Amino acid sequence: MRSKKSYRISARFKDILDVLLKAKKSRDNFLWRSSQRKTIPILIQQIHAEDNTVEITLQKNEGVVINEKEELYLKLAARDSAFKTKVQRISKDSIVLEFPDEIALSENRFENRQYFQPNDEKLVQIKKVRNNVSSLSERFFELLVSDISQTGIALFLTPAQSENFKINDYILLDALGSFRINPAITGEIVFKIPHALGAKIGIQFSKKIPKVTFDRFCVREKSFSINEEQIVRTQEFRKNVHERLDEILKTLVLRRNFLNVFERLDMRQIEHQYLKQHLYFLSEVMCGLGTKLGWVTELTMDKLIYSACLHDARYFSVPKLAKIPSLKAFEKVKKTLTPDEQNVYMEGPIFATDLARHDIEAYPDASKILIQQKELPDGSGFPYGITTSQFLPLSCLFIVSHYFVDYVFTHQDWSVTDFIKTHEKTLKGIYFQKVFQAMSR
């Protein structure tokens, strides 16, 4: 999980209308199809508050077919907001969408937030109290988490559970999964909306969830799965990558010069689960894209996986540092780290490179990939601040894949198109561009 912009869910008609009116002035609004992971640029033509509809036109409609009653998402430039909507009717010149029941509004502040799907099976335990001072309470409820920050949580409710909760009710948060909250934290239900599962409620806490408990709860036990053929091709290909990775890891752990390094990586520890998931996912994406580009042979695939195994080695003893993607992100959180942690983060690329250089069985150019892993084309990376012309093609593949993995880990509603749009401005150069082209085909 990575720190990112925080969002507030609002079901207030005034908030929704205000955002729509502001977005109408912009050309940076999009429809998003979750089923196809595609964004479609749109223009907002009219907002009909009296009948709760929004009239739009497509900026580009080549090959785009929108169906009546289809459920879509509207991503708006105004306050970086988004909501779920449905097509009400289609005419020759426009598409009419329904107003949403809720809208996600950017809070424009730096705070950890994690999103989950029902099949992630993240459960919290709460009990309802009659008001904010009474200790009189009802039975405990175990509810599925939709999204969570240290200051608030959204929960899925079944139809039976929904009957027990309403707006302005007070609850006590007793446990996040297997992690007890002692003393329990009071929260107020600030919104309740219909959902496919039954309903969804949003709770604002009276104080923050302890950070250690929050971070441990947010670790995902299930691997991410990317089904787009342009990324990982087939399940058989993914299985092949995993088998190669397991074999390379097993070999590295047995080497004497790596013994002290891999002793620090304990996959049984919950805070190390991110490193494991990140490693498998990064290997999948690199090998999949590299094969499509024609840059990856059987030997090259092992070289990429070997580089993935070593790239975070300096952070095995401090897993949270592996979640800081760049020098820019590091500067934002630097004050929250101890001097030793700051030094460890900055040592990451050189440490991994030295491991490869002193490994007599290392793959050719693996050390060059590792030393360039946190560099950027404009010279703002580290440790050497190199620029576009100095990158190896496989380093560009590694860097784009790494950013993509971080992006998917922190965006529930991710899309390849959105990733390319937000990252190709930073990752410029002929080889970076080739990787983006492979992702989009």
Image (tube, helix red, strand yellow):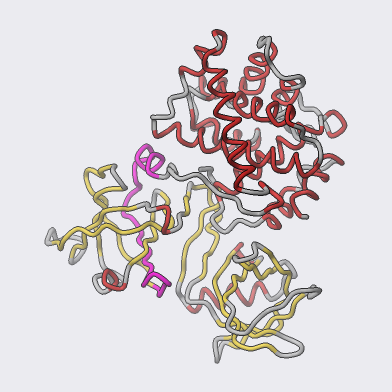
Identify the residue at the far front of this view.
236
Residue at 63 percent of width and 14 percent of height = 355
Q: Residue 352, how many percent across, how many down?
A: 63, 20
Q: Is residue 264 above or below residue 141?
A: above
Q: Is residue 19 above or below residue 422?
A: below
202 part of magenta stretch: yes
Residue at 60 percent of width and 50 percent of height = 226
Residue at 57 percent of width and 35 percent of height = 242
**Is 223 left, or right, of 369 in this rendering?**
left
Q: Residue 341, how many percent across, how many down?
A: 51, 23
**Is 388 left, or right, of 423 in this rendering?**
right
Identify the residue at the far left of this view.
136
The residues colored magenta run: 193-217
Q: Is residue 254 above or below residue 381?
A: above
Q: Residue 420, how many percent across, how many down?
A: 73, 52
The image quadrant where one finds the C terminus is bottom right
Q: Residue 374, how many percent across, how many down?
A: 69, 31
